[in-house]
Image (cartoon, helix red, strand yellow):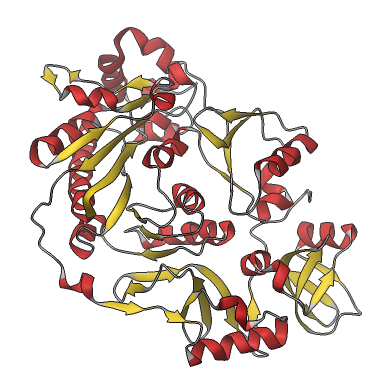
Amino acid sequence: MIPWSKNPYLLQYVTDLLGAELKTFLEAPSPAPAIRRNELKIDRESFEKFLDRLGQKYQQIPFNTDGYVLGEDNLPLSHTLNFFLGYFQYHGCSSQLPVVLLDAQPGERVLDMTAAPGSKSTQLAAVMKNQGELILNDSTLSRHQPLNVNMQRCGAVNYYVLNAWGERMGSIFPEYFDKVLLDAPCSALGTVHNNPGILDWWNVDKLVKLSRVQYQLLISAIKALKVGGELVYSTCSIAPEENEMVIQRLLNEYPLQIVNPPASLSRLFDSGWTEYQSEKFNPALSAAIRIWPQRHRMEGFFAVKLRKMDSIKINKNHDGANMISTLPATHPAVQAVTSDLEKNWGLCQSLWQNSRFVLTSTRLWVVNQFVQKVPNIRFVFAGLLLAEKKLFGWKLLNNSAQVFSDFISKRRIEATDTILNTLFASGKILLPSLADGYYVLEYKNKVLACVYSKAGETRINLPHHFNLVI
């Protein structure tokens, strides 16, 4: 049970907010774990067969055919080979809604303003089918590590990452994007049932401060949108101060129109509020979506879609125009690396004719042809990390080896079940007959990872030890 008495201010707030539903809210169970299939790497039929082989109980999320609510996760699934291969992502059920509502399309320019740790970012890359231009921003540098891990594992090449204040994105990229996702920092009050630590810090003053930040981020998002472009604003909070009240203030100041969600979505959940306490809101706010833990057995959530109807005044940041070009495959410095990859790994240089690259002295990232330029300020990384420079030459990474498995014709070693399970359980195995150097590990004709052999011992770099390989 959640110790609600630990924070009497929060208890009083939810009492005033929920009235007759207070008891059912306080006693609501923690939401079941949920996952989302990565359509960039595995089809639905194959993925469901994987779950069935494990005897895993699951239900498809009604508003997202790529999402699944799990009965239990006793293995856990994160210790399976399919997780290592990036075939799926842990992703809360309600949290999958904003990207579905945004409806980003292949070829569009899309901004995820507060991207880390990357659950929605990987979802965006997948629904865009690795096409278009996806810009991921997060102002907290320490959060970029999980973002990088998730984006690399999903095999995306249509994006780059920035470390800028979200409030500046509108001046750096004025009227640039077709779609913007703002999953705003919030009090997370909708997740309190599986995150009781909220009781340690929640107070009304912080609620007010957060609403100010949310409003400033929204203004930046509107500035970054093209006229006619669309924005989804979402929070994992049930507090009107962070949801309808922020949107109402925005509607009062800017040329925006609330977009009705598809009927298939709206009928599953509650409507947005059109009044709170003594304040009345624009009736169109009923088109917003509210998810309640006690009613929908999911994390509490709010989401609304807005369309920009006219231009607004923007004080442009000249740094935003200071862009540097990504490199084509024909660039001499890139060709030097891809030639090395062909020599050592058999990756034919013609493979890269429709790709572009970001190159440093020791790393090469590959992006799609839509990512022609990146800012030279606040830039962190872009696309799939293809190779790193080592003493003997350029080495493939686990994720790049998986993506380009069918094109690697050299330095492949076949793994038996024993070799595979030992490597994934301990991170190393004795293979005395293998000469020193890097190899890719192949299992059932599929490259899984890059391994390193020295003095008869072969090692693999893993996110954690795996107890079960399927």
Q: Is residue 183 above or below residue 265?
A: below
State the image coordinates of residue 352 (x, y, percent, origin top left). Answer: 56, 77
- Relative depth, front residue between 448 and 369: 369
Q: Residue at x 75, y 39 (%)?
A: 49
Quadrant of the rendered image containing residue 140: bottom left
Q: Is residue 111 left or right of residue 96?
A: left
Q: Residue at x 59, y 48 (%)?
A: 39
- Relative depth, front residue between 26 and 221: 221
State the image coordinates of residue 345 (x, y, percent, origin top left). Answer: 71, 81
Quadrant of the rendered image containing residue 430: bottom right
Q: Residue at x 70, y 40 (%)?
A: 45
Q: Is residue 114 above or below residue 200?
A: below
Quadrant of the rendered image containing residue 423: bottom right
Residue positioned most to the top = 20
Taking the image as drawn, is residue 33 in sight? yes
Taking the image as drawn, is residue 76 in sight? no
Q: Is residue 229 left or right of residue 78?
A: left
State the image coordinates of residue 301 (x, y, percent, origin top left). Answer: 38, 30
State the image coordinates of residue 253 (x, y, percent, origin top left). Answer: 8, 40
